Image: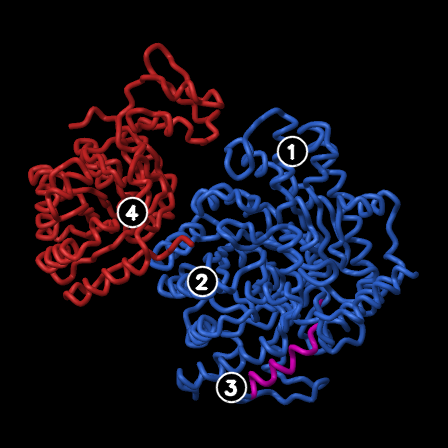
Amino acid sequence: MSDGVVAVSKFLAWSVVDGPGNRFVLFLQGCNYRCVTCHNPHTIGVCSDCGACVAVCPSGALTKAGRKVVHDPSVCIACDSCLAACPTRANPMVRRLTVDDVLDLLRRNAPFLNGLTVSGGEATLQLGFLIDLFTAIRAAPDLAHLTLFIDSNGHLPAEGWHKVLPLTDGVMLDIKAFDPERHRRLTGADNDLSLASAKLLAGAGKLYELRFLLIPGETDRPEEIAALAALARDLGPETRLRLNAFQHHGVRGPAANWSPMPRDGVEAAAVTLKAAGIAEVATPSVWLP
Amino acid sequence: MTEMLSQLRRIAQDRTLSFKQKEHALAVEAENMLPYVLLDTETRAALDARIICDMYEGNAPYKPRYVLPDYEVVLKNGSAYLELPKPETLDEAINTLQIAYHHVPSVTGMPVFIGHLDALLLPFCDGASDDELYRKIKLFWRYIDRVLPDAFLHADIGPTDNRVARAILRADAELKQVAPNLTFLYDPEVSGEAMLRLCTDNIIACSKPHIANHPIHREVFNEPGYAIVSCYNALPLRGGAASLARVNLKKVAEASANEADFFDVQLPRYVNLNARLMRARIDYLFRQSGFFDGNFLVEEGWIDRDRFTAMFGIFAMAEAVNHLQDLAGRPGRYGHDAVANALGHRISAQLADLVAREPMDHVWRGFAMLHAQAGLSSDAGTTPGVRIPYGSEPDPVSHVQALLPHHRHYLSGVSEILTLDETVRANPEAVFQLAKGALQLGFREFTANIAGNDLVRVTGFMIRLSDIRLYNAAKGSRVNTTALGAEAADTVHILDRKPRVVGLELMAGSGV
């Protein structure tokens, strides 16, 4: 069971890239990976109320009430100065929402939605909340048309999946790298759980999409692509594969100086994967100039 | 006089206008050498200050602004005046319509309405295979775009799911032409979701059709119904709109000391002055121009002089609300803040109430119909109708939610342009759900552009971005509305629209 409240970094009523149709997306705060290439590093940490952000807030939206950092969204100008100043890669603008709060948001937007996707951070870190939320949605007749998806790095043991999968329509699973040493270097964690999750989800018929971030000189290497092809084949010929390209947007630290993934490299990888028998390989639909 | 002559010379010698376009521009200038219809001083002063605006329709209104003929008349009876027999085959029916279009006047010089095409053509389709039908529609479409190249020209289809509507949607997505503009009249009880999905897939292909909420429009009009024409105006079929004049809400707000003064004094005052302007122009059309006398369109029953409404336009709602917010010391902006949005909704309700207290002679049902006017390409610093300023629109769902409460007040039309980013191409289900949700909640019309389409909507009409580039390189364009699009792109920065699309309107004197 959860304590009934979850920290939400951001929510959207319109997303066309987080599963089928238009999806309400909840980005939960906090992650169990520390990816050097993370495009949303401010979702990784949990606020320690240190107050470093209060000092740099130009609009007075952030203040300290006793030991707590408090954010007033009505004054916030969304300049993101606080995110840059945060030493723990947290986000002082997070909102704490209950299951009822989320149901209310969904109801307000229900006619426009095909479903809900819970992303992160790492969504499965809040497994209790996920189960409570999905259970409540399944019990609400006016939300019956919504499909429920999870976007995850797969770092969850089988017993966790067994609890939430009966309530879940599909999972989008990110595999960060296949070589164990590379995975540790890129994410700070081992990849055995996420590889096991891929098999578990595919076996349960709940793997909506397998995602793979191509990073030049790291995950675009032939041995990584070959391992990806082998896994996808192993999971079944109907596996949807989505290739994403490493870009600089949002990235902090040394990876900000790495080369972005070029379009021709992504397309070459897609060709290789299709030649290896993977039927559906999606590449980014928009390329930045 | 010298200034007038040099303006005429400028048109005559313009290197980018075609012969036809020059002829129309010269005719507009000639009309405007006549004295303006008679106005009282107070109305004249408000017009000169452009707090109210006549859309530069011309000094001596000698034709209604929009004419919506009931083309069924000529398809059932033929025309004695045009020496046309009643058509018997599909070819004859299309040929009869093509001839009919040349006899329909409007403010642009080209018809703004070419018929409920599926209902008109279905009775002639029994012998034609689907493939034959599709090929004939393609030729018909080519004819319209090449011979009547004006994006205000509008075809309607629906609400039923039928062979002609499907052939039209298929040809339209394939040809990606500027003309005709296209509206599907959607009725969830009749059309079916498969048809709605076909429409939203077409939007991804070519930003057309526009989808009208048929049950909501239908209940406004009596028999023989209505049509959506030009920049998404809902008007009585077999009639149209005699005139359109509009109030600049930004200027009304700027003339107000505070919110109470705006609601109690200034808004009622300028609504009344705009009504006086409309009455004077409509009186000239009906009693002095002779338009309805000896006109075969009237005599043969294509149009009925009792079915012309008056469009009471408003624009710059966003700027008006933001100005009133400033006066009250409130930071919230229109489109993003609940208090600002509610203020806007209250203005719309007040407008509807005020317009319903201004009776008008000659006008269908005796009162004007409120209209969220989409703008002129010469408008600077104002946002069309009740829209959210270009470049500051929220996500499409929040966008629809913010504007929804306005829609019930604008009986003769209100349109938003939802600009969707390119990623939706890979997820057409999302566009379908967005349209379905908006229509279900009472949006009168659903209109969307996909960023990256060459064919984009400029408020109501369609232009090609590549045409604008060509025009700006001074090569001229075959299509009338490109000049308007280019002017608006420069003046009101329509291409700043997030992500990169549209929202302006027409050149003074020519269009919607």
Residue contact between numbered discs 4 and 2, judged by CB atoms under 8 Å: no
The amino acid marked with disc number 4 is: Gly
Chain corresponding to blue in the figure: B
Residue where numbered disc 2 is placed: B203
Residue A115 - label = 4
- Label 1 environment density (alpha carbons within 10 Å; few <14, some 14–19, many ≥20): many
The amino acid at mark 1 is His
Alpha carbons under labels 2 and 3: distance apart: 28 Å
Residue drawn at (23%, 44%), measured in percent from left and top?
Answer: A151
Label 1 element class: helix
Marks 2 and 3, the one that precedes in the sequence: 3
Secondary element at image label 3: helix
- The mark lying in front, picked from 4 and 2, is 2
Q: Distance between the residues labelled 1 and 2?
A: 35 Å
Identify the amino acid type marked 2: Ile
Q: Which of marks 1 and 2 is nearer the N terminus?
A: 2
Residue B217 sits in quarter: bottom right
CA distance separating discs 1 and 4: 38 Å
Q: Is residue B99 magenta?
A: yes
Which region of the structure is painted magenta?
Answer: B92-106
Dominant secondary structure of the residues highlighted in magenta in the image: helix
Q: In the image, which is nearer the foreground, mark 1 or mark 3? A: 1
* Whole-percent x, y for residue B8 in the image: 84, 67
Q: How far is the residue under mark 4 from the one under mark 2?
A: 22 Å
Mark 4 surroundings: few (<14), some (14-19) or many (≥20) residues within 10 A: many
